[in-house]
Structure formats: C-alpha cells, structure tokens
Image (cartoon, rainbow, N blue to C red):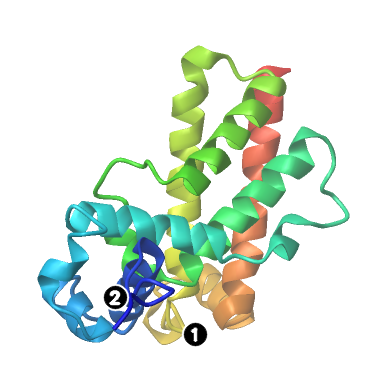
Amino acid sequence: MGRPRQPILSVDKIATAALRLVDEGHDLRMGDVAAALGVRPSSLYNHVSGKADVVEAMRGLIFHDVPRSVDTGADASGWEGRLRSLLRRYRESFARHPRVIPLLTAQTVSAPSVMAMYDELATVLVGCGVPESRLLDVVTVLDSFVIGSALDVAAPDDVWDSSAATTDHLRRAIDASPRGRERADQAFELGVELLVAGIASSTA
C-alpha cells in the first residue's frame, strides 16, 4: 500500500483538536489530544515537541480564524482607527476561546500570526509618538485590557446582583445597564476610547 497523499497529522490538525478539547472544558493533555485524533500519543511528537508547541499553535490558530471583517469600520483610518481595529480583533480572538486564555498567558508568545499583530501594534504606537522606551509598557496595558475584556464576554448575563448593592447609585446603574454581550461590548468600546484618548494626550 502506497503512502497517503495527505499526512494524517499536521500541526494545524493537532492544534484544532487541542483547541476543541479546551473549549469543551478539558485540561490540555497530549494523550487526550491523540485520542481525539485517533492516533497514538507518540505520533504527535513527529509534529510538535510538546505541550508548549501545541499551545503556540493554538494561539496562532485563534488569531488566524478571526474574520477580517472585525478589522474594518468607518473609523479605520489614522493611527486611532488602526489601534481600535487591532484591539477589536485581538479581543474577538480571545473572546471566542476564553478557556484557552490561562494557557496562552503562561508562556512566551512566538506564533508568527500573533507576532505580526504585535509588530503592527508597535508600528502604530511608535507612529503616533509612543517612545520605544515606553512601548512595552503601553503594549502591556493594552494586553491587560483586551484579555480582561475577552473574559468579560464569557461572564454571566447578570454580572452583579442589584438586590445585594448597598448604595442606590450602584443599584440604579445595574438595573439600567444592558445585559450579556451588549453590556460587555459597550464597556469594551468605552475602554478603547479612553485608552486611545490617553495615548493621544500623553504623546501630544
């Protein structure tokens, strides 16, 4: 019997199986990934060196799968528009797979598609006046905001119990707020505008 035209395994196939398992609430175990693919665990190591490689492949897959339409919009011009688009796409990639976030934040970023996003972000920030000496500080702030916002998308529809509030201010705010994804999106967009304004004022 000749060799199959297409390999049974690939890095993308391994990452896809691993991502599906984590999305379903399972821990990331190489044995479980192999079982999901119907192969022996040893077969995985012909394509990846270990769990860290799988996590980076998952990171790249997550970013690659976000529709480009997330990047576009009426305000997608100038550095402010480019920054808004980058943050929206970054958040959307994480929001689709919130269970993966702890794995991704626990190791060094190296996936090419993700580093390309950071390269573009760095170019935008330096272009609007952020000095290289503060570049990683600003990137870290943006990272923290986006990751938190992505986790917020997975929060319950009712994040706060208004009956447990001890001030009228908070109770009225909770009762008047939209629920679910609408609330999360509204808060994210406010945060984006505050960050853009803060960067603009600090580089003026």
Kindly identify the residue that appears in the image at 45 percent across and 55 percent down: 60
Place residue 177 in its image quadrant: bottom right
Q: Where the C terminus falls, by quadrant? A: top right
Looking at the image, residue 196 sits to the left or right of residue 174; the answer is: right
Q: Closest to the observer: 67 or 40?
A: 40
Which residue is the extreme one toward the front? 1
Kindly identify the residue that appears in the image at 49 percent across and 19 percent down: 134
Q: State the image coordinates of residue 124 (x, y, percent, origin top left).
A: 67, 30
**Which residue has dot 2 on it?**
22
Q: Is residue 198 above or below residue 14?
A: above
Question: Badges 1 and 2: C-beta atoms under 8 Å apart?
Answer: no
Q: State the image coordinates of residue 184 (x, y, percent, origin top left).
A: 57, 70
Which of pointers 1 and 2 lies earlier in the amino acid sequence?
2
Place residue 1 in its image quadrant: bottom left
Place residue 121 in its image quadrant: top right
Residue type, numbered disc 1: Asp
Q: State the image coordinates of residue 131 (x, y, percent, origin top left).
A: 57, 14
Q: Closest to the observer: 164 or 94?
A: 94
Q: State the image coordinates of residue 171 (x, y, percent, origin top left).
A: 51, 77
- Give the number of marks: 2
Kindly identify the residue that appears in the image at 58 percent across and 82 percent down: 179
Residue at mark 1 to residue at mark 2: CA–CA distance: 22 Å
Q: Secondary structure at mark 1?
A: loop
Q: Closest to the observer: 158 or 1?
A: 1
Marker disc for residue 157: 1
Number of residues whose C-alpha sits closer than 10 Å to that of mark 1, classed few (under 14), some (14–19) or many (20 or more): some
Looking at the image, residue 18 sits to the left or right of residue 174; the answer is: left
Residue type, numbered disc 2: Val
Q: Is residue 178 above or below residue 130?
A: below
Looking at the image, residue 51 sits to the left or right of residue 110; the answer is: left
Marker disc for residue 108: none
Q: Is residue 81 above or below residue 40?
A: above
